[in-house]
């Protein structure tokens, strides 16, 4: 532990400078106009892996953005850890809400503000630096494989193909991922569940052209009004989702699971204060932690139609659209829920409009074991570096890749994340605490050490 | 009549060229970035009025865009016609739906395609050319005053001030306006009623920042969902507006008025075919002509919130907004309806969001007399040039200025429009038939002639 702390101490500034370099690339995978930047980011990641001491580093081409692979096999007899991360980031808009430019990392009271600071550049890069540390201090106790992709924020659509084509190369005993959050540095935690995702786009068409709302208003269905009525009908008065069969496969937690989940430190007043809301919202009969961790949800991620510029335009638009995504819990399937949604949404469309429903990427829900060697190694690593046993939690987010690994490679994952819910992932002013960054670099070598020991 | 036809025939091409010049100015009053173009348009209009023979032409400055004034007083004993029009146009977006550029007028099978072709450049410019014709042929039978403004599409907010300050200069016996439509060239008509307008913008705020829909979804109110539920609640199952007191001052038509209104040639199947809709929509118990001409309506003109770019972003947004306008019928007041809308919309906002309601421009509803000398002159002018007596109709649109004239100047208006409902006002590919343009130039001198004769 002392050796680790010393190495981090001696290289503090460089570790930060390198992360800043990485954060300056606007690697937005959702927007084609950043293609060149995303590719530059991939090259940068490969370069850094090589410098850290990885062998067989390769920029693996795919139908989309490349996947960076690298490995260090020290002894075939030792267990192997496959490290997954992603170098792409969410779009930065709405830009005007950022206090400092999203792609010019800025430090304010100990926090790094930048798009991707936490999700996932700041977190996967801890693994690159922890690997460098273990190489330089000759403390690497496991074989290590890196797989850093560039399409996580758009559904990892090409990763599945890559994994299926590289089962041999990716052989490992555990997948280690840092792309999740802890409750707090005082209450370290490990996520043991992730929700799946079904992401749909709907388009409602009324008249074949935009109309003058004075000449036609009141006599022709307004697609915005109709879309609003359709969206409004998707939740009932208890905020229960009204889509038939939506909950059929959802299993309620046992009393014990509920108790364990709700034992996590959580203060609803702080939560409301942080978000500046007067009242929380959600499915009747469930606590906030149950709603975000264990229940499926339906959220409208975007809506647009008609005139949205300055001033007033008296138009009755031809079309209105929305992006609607659903978070899924164990036993729900992304394809099945997408199909159920489409069928339902088309079924509630009235005569006077046409509806088009298309599916974006999806992902399957997963629950990771808490009784595995890998989980116990993670638990012990955190206990050592934080001085506290981590609380197992259920996160609301989705990392589709976790389910993919189980299916294709038959490997379970450990979600050893060092972020915080307040890091504003996917929001303006995303941040990552410098403290957490270094803390992660210190903790990860311990995981490898204990994983090797416990595997004996 | 022969003399008129000959003059139009001899100047056909020039009349068209001048209109095209006028249409090439992108005089979008709603968007500040066109300020320079709007001002150039004003100068062009003033220049053309001078060339046509108007005296005292002046570009009258206002707090907003200037008003062009010009006059020709031939004999104080003769009646005076005040011609009103506007040189500003609606925004052209969505641009991608235009078949040819909105500000490069293009002729396709006898129709001029351009923003403002009909509303209102093509229509007010007929008056300028008709005036030139009467001057050049020494047939001007009345005194004429022109008042062409540049803020009609944004609520004529400064025209009221101008009119109040210029009651002497604007003294007249009738206001003549061509900014409305006819049923068809085979069924000429004159609009005798206009609806008022109340135009609101609403903003619903949930959490104080955009959130990750996985981490917070299901536990925090989504402002888009809430806005949709609020908008959905504004119409009941009979498409009746649910705002308390909204209909209090609305007077139903008498059986005779209903009969007269519905006697206008109208084919619901053609209407649906033209708009490519399977079913019409509207307030239960009223015909389409009643819904657009005589009933107040509420339409969502625009809605936006969350991520509306390419691809998928899993965000639970902080805000969602909409532009909502209401068309008003006689006895309803724009300010009063704006106030009850705001009160109602705020009252239906649930705890877990904050709502902001602001009012854009409004306008009062009017009904123009069908028994006045001016109306009879218009009727006779159309009978002469079309060979058919015009049908009095009730239009759904709003020209706030008409009510203003009655209040401040005590002058009634005649709405002698030559457009068609199919002209796609406020829509992509707005057009105006060349035939209607020339027909208007031929008909307007007859109005002046008969107005002078009937006034004797």
Image: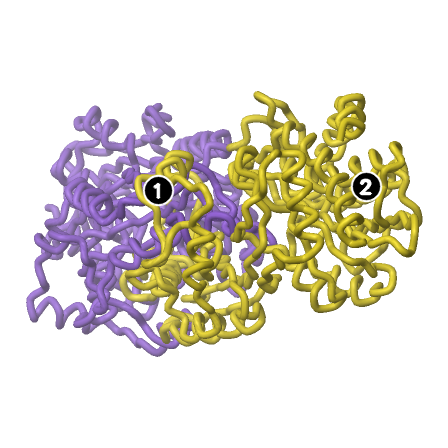
Chain colours: A purple, B yellow
Are discs 2 and 1 both within one chain?
no
Residue sitting nearer the eye, A243 or A75 = A243
Label disc, if present, on residue A142 of the rendered structure: none
> Mark 1 — on which chain does it sit?
A
The C terminus of chain B, quarter of image: bottom right
Query: Mark 2: few, some, or many residues within 10 Å (few <14, many ≥20)?
Result: many
> Mark 2 — on which chain does it sit?
B
Helix, strand or loop at label 1? It is strand
Residue A354, percent from left and from top = 31, 40
Residue sitting nearer the eye, B37 or B326 = B326
Q: Quadrant of residue B140?
A: top right
Residue A332, percent from left and from top = 13, 49
Residue appearing at x 91%, y 50% in the figure: B73
Residue appearing at x 8%, y 54% in the figure: A248
Image height of A6 relative to A284, above or below:
above
Label 2 to label 1, Cα distance in Å?
Answer: 42 Å
Image height of B290 relative to A387, above or below:
above
Residue A9, percent from left and from top = 45, 55
Helix, strand or loop at label 2? It is helix
Q: In the rendered view, does B99 fall on the left or right side of A66?
A: right
Q: Residue furthest bottom?
A: A269
Residue A217 visible, this orientation: yes
The N terminus of chain B, quarter of image: top right
Q: Quadrant of residue A396?
A: bottom left
Residue sitting nearer the eye, B251 or B159 = B251
Contact? badges 2 and 1 (CB < 8 Å): no
Residue pointed to by mark 1: A203
Image height of A356 relative to B63, above or below:
above
Residue appearing at x 46%, y 38% in the figure: A209
Residue pointed to by mark 2: B45
Query: Mark 1: few, some, or many residues within 10 Å (few <14, many ≥20)?
Result: many
Residue B2, percent from left and from top = 77, 27
């Amino acid at each position: 532990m002392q050796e680790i702390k010393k190495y981090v101490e001696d290289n503090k500034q460089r570790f930060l400078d390198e992360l800043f370099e990485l954060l300056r690339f606007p690697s937005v995978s959702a927007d084609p106009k950043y293609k060149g930047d995303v590719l530059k980011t991939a090259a940068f990641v490969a370069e850094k892996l090589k410098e850290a001491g990885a062998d067989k580093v390769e920029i693996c081409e795919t139908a989309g953005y490349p996947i960076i692979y690298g490995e260090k096999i020290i002894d075939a007899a030792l267990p192997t850890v496959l490290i997954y991360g992603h170098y792409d980031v969410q779009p930065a808009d709405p830009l005007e809400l950022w206090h400092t430019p999203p792609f010019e990392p800025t430090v304010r009271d100990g926090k790094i503000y930048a798009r991707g600071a936490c999700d996932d550049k700041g977190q996967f890069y801890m693994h690159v630096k922890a690997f460098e540390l273990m190489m330089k201090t000759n403390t690497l106790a496991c074989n290590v494989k890196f797989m850093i992709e560039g399409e996580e924020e758009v559904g990892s659509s090409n990763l599945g193909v890559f994994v299926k084509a590289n089962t041999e190369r990716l052989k490992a005993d555990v997948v280690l991922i840092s792309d999740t959050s802890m409750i707090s540095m005082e209450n370290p935690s490990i996520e043991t569940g992730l929700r799946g995702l079904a992401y749909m786009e709907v388009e409602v068409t009324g008249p074949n052209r935009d109309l003058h709302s004075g000449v036609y208003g009141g006599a022709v269905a307004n697609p915005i009004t109709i879309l609003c009525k359709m969206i409004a009908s998707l939740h009932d008065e208890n905020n229960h989702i009204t889509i038939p069969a939506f909950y059929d496969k959802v299993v309620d937690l046992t009393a014990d699971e509920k108790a364990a989940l709700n034992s996590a430190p959580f203060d609803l007043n702080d939560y409301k204060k942080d978000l500046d809301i007067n009242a929380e919202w959600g499915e009747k009969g469930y606590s906030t932690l149950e709603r975000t961790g264990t229940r499926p949800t339906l959220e409208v991620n975007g809506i647009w139609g008609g005139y949205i510029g300055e001033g007033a335009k008296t138009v009755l638009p031809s079309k209105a659209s929305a992006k609607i995504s659903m978070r899924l819990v164990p036993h729900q399937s992304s394809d099945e829920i997408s199909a159920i949604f489409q069928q339902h949404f088309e079924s509630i469309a009235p005569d006077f409009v046409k509806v088009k429903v298309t599916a974006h990427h999806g992902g399957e829900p997963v629950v990771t074991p808490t009784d595995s060697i890998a989980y116990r190694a993670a638990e012990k690593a955190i206990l050592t570096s934080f001085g506290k046993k981590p609380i197992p939690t259920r996160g609301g987010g989705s990392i589709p890749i976790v389910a993919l690994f189980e299916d294709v490679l038959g490997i379970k994952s450990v979600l050893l994340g060092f972020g915080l819910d307040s890091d504003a992932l996917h929001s303006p002013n995303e941040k990552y605490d410098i403290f957490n960054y270094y803390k992660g670099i210190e903790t990860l070598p311990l995981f490898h050490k204990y994983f090797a020991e416990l595997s004996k």
